[in-house]
Amino acid sequence: MHRYDNNSQLKAALEKKLGGPITEDLFNELTAVRYPPYSDLDLQDIIKELGLAPAKLTRKELAQVIREIAEEVTLLQEIRLNEIEPALRQARGNVFKVTEGNIDEATAFLARFFGNQEPAIRTAYVTLFFQAHISPNDLELYIVTMKPNPPERFLVLVAFVMNQAYLSAREAMYYILTGQRTIEMGIFNPSQALMMHHLIHYLQPGGRPVRSLLSAKEKALLHFVYTTEGPLKPTILWPRWNQQYPQWPYDNWRFFWKALKRAEKRLLADYVMAFEAEYMQKKDPDHFWQKWSGIAKGLGA
């Protein structure tokens, strides 16, 4: 899929496709809500808005779209896990009562947890686990204020990771046990609800999300930042990026950091909304569509 890095390239491609020039005002109107870099999907969308028929995705192109969506979901999980790591590190110590990275002790704890026929877990913690909707502030409240026993602490921690990173219980336990983050497909699997939320736009006639999928450069940028150990300081990361990716250099750390934040914004926007929809549907399925249509309309979705 061809990518256009700026307005000039996209406008030139559009004029070539249409066989003639378009006004600057019209072009600005058509691209007002988009974020560079652009792709052929943006070009198709602009052509559609001009009243022309958009090209249909072939089976091969659709397979590529699905792979790219899956990669984006996994990148989102990577960002979430990185953001919650400070809270998780403290909570992991509270649960296992061991130093960071002691997998043997953590494994022994899990063996005791799953081998206990009557772990004495209060109903409130079981409910919390199945709802899996907990914030960093909630985590501190449950572990410090409500004084859960070790099995209850573990359920709270699993629910916390599941919610923040969109992982299944099995994936959350693996992450808690090893303390490892990865974006390799097949280890952390994207939520099916999030996948379907994004795909449905493509499967509608001529449909696609307002924001195009991330470019290869943006994927590499997010991957690089959120798999780097240590503090995420742009002045430190920027020269490392230029050395590792000489084909995509930035002139200074400010440009580097601005590009990262733009990629984060484009990645998070749809999926955060999708997660809220998924949560609402589980919480109140009888009134989900009525509530969600009102919220989506208010957000301009």
Image (tube, rainbow, N blue to C red):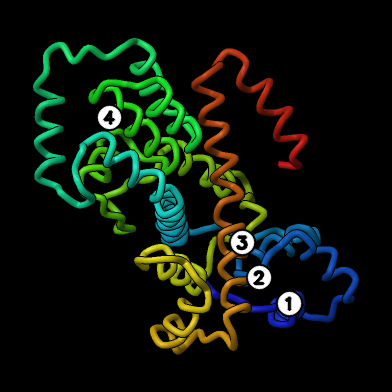
First in sequence, mark 3 or 2: give its number.
2
Q: Which residue is mark 4?
A: 154
Q: Which mark is residue 55?
A: 3
Q: Which residue is mark 1?
A: 7
Residue drawn at the location 74% of the way across and 27% of the way down: 294
Percent across and percent down for residue 83 are 46, 52
CA gap, disc 4 to disc 3? 50 Å
The crowding category of the residue bearing disc 1, from other C-alpha atoms within 10 Å (few below 14, some 14 to 19, many at least 20), is: some
Residue drawn at the location 77% of the way across and 65% of the way down: 31
Q: Which residue is mark 2?
A: 36
Q: What kind of element bears circle 3?
A: loop
First in sequence, mark 4 or 2: give its number.
2
Q: What kind of element bears circle 4?
A: helix
CA gap, disc 4 to disc 1? 50 Å
CA gap, disc 3 to disc 2? 21 Å
Q: Quadrant of the C terminus?
A: top right
Q: Which mark is residue 16?
A: none
Q: Amino acid at mark 2?
A: Pro
Q: Amino acid at mark 4?
A: Phe
Tell me the mark number nearer the camera, choosing from 4 and 2. Answer: 4
Q: What kind of element bears circle 2?
A: loop
Q: Amino acid at mark 1?
A: Asn
